[in-house]
Image (cartoon, grey):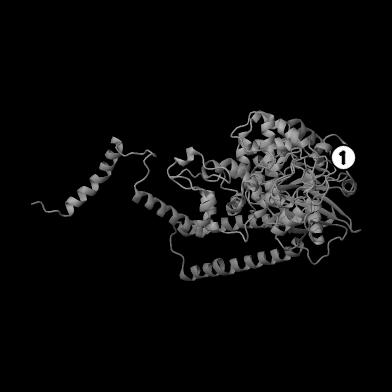
Amino acid sequence: MIRINWKHAAVALAVLPFAALLFAWIGFFNVGASTGHWKITDWFLHFAMRSAVRTYALAVNEPERLPVEAIKPAAGHFARGCAICHGAPGEPRSPAAMNMLPRPPDLSYSVGEWQDAELFRIVKHGVRFTGMPAWPTQNRDDEVWAMVAFLRALPDLDVGSYRELAYGNAGAPELHTTSFGGAVAECGRCHGADGAGGGPATPLIAGQSEAYLAASMEAFAEGRRASGFMALPAAAVDAAEIDALAAHFAALPPQRHDAGQEVAQDRLERGERIARAGVAAAGVPACLGCHGADRNPLYPRIRGQRPDYLAQQLRLFRAGQRGGGPFSHLMTNAAKGLTDEDILDLAAYFATQDDPGR
Amino acid sequence: MLAPFALCGCSGVQSALDPAGDESAIVANLFWVMVIGGAFIWIGVIGTLLFAISRRERPVSDAGAGRLILWGGAVFPSVTLLFLLAFALWLMPGLRPFATPADASMTVEVTGKQFWWQVAYRLPDGSRVAAANEVRLPVGKRVEFALESDDVIHSFWIPALGGKMDMIPGRRNRLSLLATKAGTFRAPCAEYCGTSHALMAFSAVAMEPSDFDAWLAAQAEPAAGVSGEGREAFLRNGCGACHRVDGTEANATIGPDLSHVGSRKTIGAGILPNTEAAIASFIANPGAIKPDAKMPAFGALPAAEIDAMAAWLKGLE
């Protein structure tokens, strides 16, 4: 009779990794998705995933409220990037997605199982060992929150309102467009055929400087300007179409931000002071030095632009996360010394200005 | 063998031993008295040492040793140090003449910034002439400097004219200097202030009073070349958001005043010769010349545009 002592246990432990390696090398373990997991494996993986999302969500800083004003570009992104696996109102999941392991949930039903911070965590970072990808950039929490806001709205959307939100008047997105008309439709889904759609968080592009539009699209497509919303359509359009698209939207009649709410007079005055003279003590240059009339066409026209968009771009510049064309580093320097209040003052001021050159 | 290197410090545009001002003359004077006096004392000490180790027929008596210690070890050093202290204290009023009011004709305000100098000549009639990275002063007239800093501690030092004075954020330090010889001198920042501290200097130019008055009057007006070619590129690319050029809409104070940049001795605060090529290279990539400089690179502009701006700036005399 063999007596098992600590020596046997030690030898078994030492041999175990090699046995595991041998097992994997022989290749008997079935990695096919067709048969599914064992019930216990399935339970364990989901248990581990839900626990991890719950725990990591504790470290997420939630905004005071979800950015519901930004759900239109989020809906457009959902239609292009998410609906193929998760389905959408009037559009069931693709049969290809139904055979994934694990099967992607129909979000119209399952989104209610998660807290906002948990959804943020999943959308931003994706889920390992599933098909769920991370957000295209890790620097745009504002976009991820917009997506969370859209997901909250999703269960209540009927087919018509979903399509209105996600497609505008441009029809469903294409994976890659090869025609100019298709490319214009890609832009128009969020920006509108008139270059003035998309809601408060989306920039007006009608009448924008042509050189700036082209440089920005290249920057989005090449990842030099971080945005999940823009990375997909910018990559879906042929690079050869970019100049024509820029010319098309630059030539559209400029649209002005429609001031929906009254802005306090002292805010406008503070904004104008910074725009004209900068904040010398904080090293903030005068905005109009570069954004005035007759300037380098690679500097964008910002007078009459939507204030929410302007403020968000200034915050991104200040954090060093904006990127963009060949002169975007000028703004990274310029925005460093701005306070939160300065940013709101400037956004309000520029939104109410007419651009004589536009 | 080291003497030639050491002697390099005795003259030149950045030497305190080649004085061109009354304060630096006092400092140089004190230095030579100390060095020569120190040399004599050193000879005396070595002589005493040789005497102590030399072979003698009979040893020094106890009384003789006691006298040597008393006179050589106590009386002589005390008297010498007393005289040196009195001499130095006697020189002090001349070194920092705060009590004597400076000729109130002009105050030069110099503000240290990372990594350049903002300069303004405040005239008795209240007007202000802005400049940067160069200080000019008339020979034979005492000039008062008001020294400040916008960011970290810098130190203002024109070795050929006088001693150092720190520039401290939130304080206004005073210094008065009297140049006695015309000339151009180099003045380095004398307090570590960041990555490009060693690349932060300015030129101090002492001029005959009549020349100085003519120069200052010209500085108060726009430069002759201000409407020339290149101005358009300067404004179109937003340079006016940080710089001022008198006679144009550019009127900002974040970066150096460029109204008369073409007449300055150097570019980039004392580090490059003032040539069109140097100006163009600074515009294209300031960080390569001056690490951590606040000015962003404009290398993405077409070279022809940069050259046009450089030629225009060089023409602002």
Identify the residue at horizontal 65%, vertical 57% (top origin): B34
Q: Position of residue A32 (x, y in %)?
A: 37, 38
Q: Chain of mark 1?
A: B
Left or right: B48 in relation to B257: left
Secondary structure beneath dot 1 equals: helix
> On screen, A232 above or below B95?
above
Q: Position of residue B179 (x, y in %)?
A: 80, 52
> Residue B218 lies in what quarter of the image?
top right
* Residue B91 visible, this angle: yes
Q: Residue type at mark 1: give it.
A: Val
Q: Which residue is mark 1?
A: B226
> On screen, A177 above or below B103?
above
Identify the residue at horizontal 75%, vertical 58% (top origin): B147
- Front-lying residue, A3 or A241: A241
Q: Quadrant of the C terminus of chain B?
A: top right
Q: Quadrant of the N terminus of chain B?
A: top right
> On screen, B51 above or below A303?
below
- Front-lying residue, B314 or A239: A239
Q: Position of residue A134 (x, y in %)?
A: 52, 45
Left or right: B61 in relation to B32: left
- Front-lying residue, B22 or B112: B112
- Front-lying residue, A209 or B118: A209
> On screen, A13 above or below A249?
below
* Residue B15 visible, this angle: no
Left or right: B299 in relation to A350: left
Identify the residue at horizontal 52%, vertical 68% (top origin): B69
Q: Position of residue B305 (x, y in %)?
A: 77, 33
